[in-house]
Image: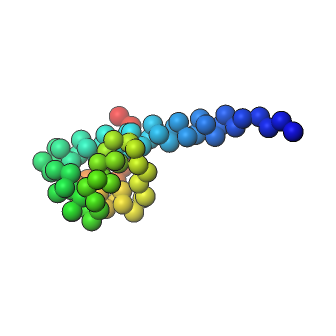
Amino acid sequence: MFVAPNFRFAGLMALAAKHRVIVGKNIRACRTSAGLTLEQLAEKADMSWPYLSEIERGRENISLDKLARLAQALNVRLSKLVENT
């Protein structure tokens, strides 16, 4: 039986990777604007700095709960971290 490749799934995965990069860039921009190091922000948001580094580089997924903790630690609206400007 022939099964056609799921191109829609591949497209969704590519889109997810794009969103990870956008979120990561926004987090880094807010962090540097606040004058915080990776270690400082990670401590404020109760997460590890290597994990935060992976998020900033768009290599790791982040849960909504952790994203909300980062927004609070950065004193920005959650929407600021996910907007595509």
What residue is rendered at 29% in x and 62% in y? 47
Q: Quadrant of residue 24?
A: top left
Q: Position of residue 62 (x, y in %)?
A: 41, 54
Q: Which residue of the protein is positioned furthest toward the left in this rendering?
A: 35
Q: Could you say which quadrant of the image residue 18 lies in?
A: top left
Quadrant (top left, top right, bottom left, bottom right) of the N terminus: top right
Q: Is residue 77 left or right of residue 9?
A: left
Is residue 45 among the parts visible in the rendering? yes
- For this rendering, which residue is in front, 80 or 12? 12
Name of the residue lying farthest toward the bottom: 46
**Above or below: residue 57 compared with residue 51:** above
Q: Position of residue 25 (x, y in %)?
A: 31, 40
Q: Position of residue 84 (x, y in %)?
A: 39, 37
Picture residue at 35% right of the left edge, 34% below the top: 85
Residue at position x 24%, y 58% from top?
A: 42
40 relative position to 7: left or right: left
- Judged from this view, the residue extending furthest toward the right is 1
Return the residue found at the far front. Answer: 1
Q: Position of residue 59 (x, y in %)?
A: 40, 44
